Image (spheres, grey):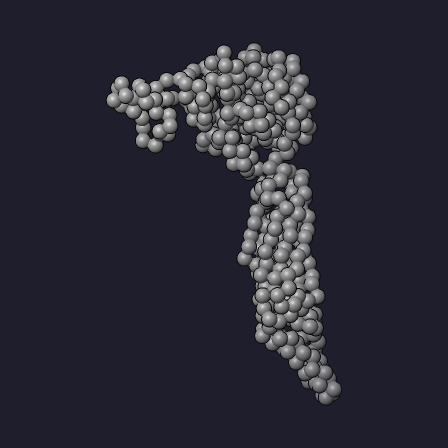
Amino acid sequence: MPTLRGWALLGAGLALALLWYLFGDPELLLTGVFTLAASLLALAYIRFHRPSLAIGRRLGSAVVHNGDTTTITLVLENRGDRTIRRLTVEDEVSQLGLAGFELASLGPGEVATATYRVTCRPRGVYKVGPALASSADPLGLAEMQSPGKVTDRIVVYPTVEGLSGFPIVRGRDQALHASRPEHSQRGGEDFYTLREYQRGDDLRRVHWPYSAKTEDLMIRQLETPWQSRALVLLDVRPSVYESADAFETAVSGAASVVTHLIRSGFDADMWAGDSETIDATRYSAAMERLALVEPNRDIDISAVASRLKSAGGGGALVLVTGVADRSLLGVQQLLSTEYRTTVLLGASSTTPQTLVGFHRMGAATVTVEPGQKWANAWLSAMRSSWDAVSVS
């Protein structure tokens, strides 16, 4: 197709032809024909010199945190037997921007690279590409576009702060027990009880002496009473947030707590508006969920609490919200028999009356203004509410 210069030349040629028709000057006709012929020859050149270009891409990091900068490198290879001239390449990161590069020429078999930087903000999952390459004739009158086929994505996690300290919860000490017997689903070493073999069980856990006595395969069922457990619940109801900034602060708080718990060896789950909890030990899945989470006005937080209570788990409950309301207090009261330790994180510029109820239930409260950091308020709350232990 013609470039901007090519369209201008075509327009000039047609204008000259019109002037020749009006005034009959042969020089106008000759100039108009020459101009139109140049444009047509440029289009023919591009048509018969279609580039054979391979476009690849390398990401400096496919996973970053909100506000981080990453690099993207395009790799261009001329796989044809002709030189590609006046090569222009554009690559787009959805919602973040468009980068463009120009090369005077790229010879047969040559490889060229072009690198650009992207500041990743806000959190989310961004599509990169496909790149679009355009080559022009030597005069720049016509161009041929060659769309790339490769797309990538960049996952932008919420901002994560380094937290320090956590209250002693049931299960951290081998002398303490969970609120009810907890069979290990993710590992463990201490012997707890025996049960009959089920298809798919690990045969290394067969208790052979007892199996010989009963003539039935018996499996050692393990318990992990020393391993800390936790549930992080991010309140996604828009009614409890004073602003979009407050919600983003809460998301950052949830991401920071999840990161802190996983680094500290907790067996943690996370709920962030889905039908089921997410195993936070699958860190990338949990953080990607937080990268995409949005407020949901259809959530019934009481019904969610009932489902979580039936799933059980024990240990610590971390509630992350904006302005803690009575519905969230009801969640804490309902789950208190399963989760004996509660920490409430609130991103709010006001102090709700319900905080008294959380304090009476023994919850530690951490509050910050929307847009502020969590780390100092978290550490202060840990020190003032419990004898905090360092789990850094």
Q: Is residue 366 above or below residue 12?
A: above
Residue 222, by quadrant, is top left
Name the residue located 57 percent from the left edge and 59 percent from the top edge. 148
Classify residue 376 as left or right of residue 261. Answer: right
Quadrant of the frame with the C terminus: top right
Give percent across and percent down for residue 31.
72, 83
Name of the residue lying farthest toward the left: 215
In the image, 361 versus 148, the foreground residue is 148
Give percent across and percent down for residue 22.
70, 84
Q: Is residue 51 above or below residue 388?
A: below
Name the residue located 32 percent from the left edge and 22 percent from the top edge. 208
Residue 371, by quadrant, is top right
Name the residue located 65 percent from the left edge and 41 percent from the top edge. 121
Q: Is residue 74 above or below residue 70?
A: below
In the image, 347 versus 99, the foreground residue is 99
Q: Is residue 75 above or below residue 328?
A: below
Classify residue 193 as left or right of residue 73. Answer: left
Residue 184 visible in image: yes
Give percent across and percent down for residue 53.
59, 64
In the image, 307 versus 91, the foreground residue is 91
Quadrant of the frame with the N terminus: bottom right
In the image, 30 versus 19, the foreground residue is 30
Give percent across and percent down for residue 304.
46, 26
Residue 235 visible in image: no
Name the residue located 68 percent from the left edge and 48 percent from the top edge. 117
Instruction: Tally the numbered discs.
Output: 0
Residue 113, by quadrant, is bottom right
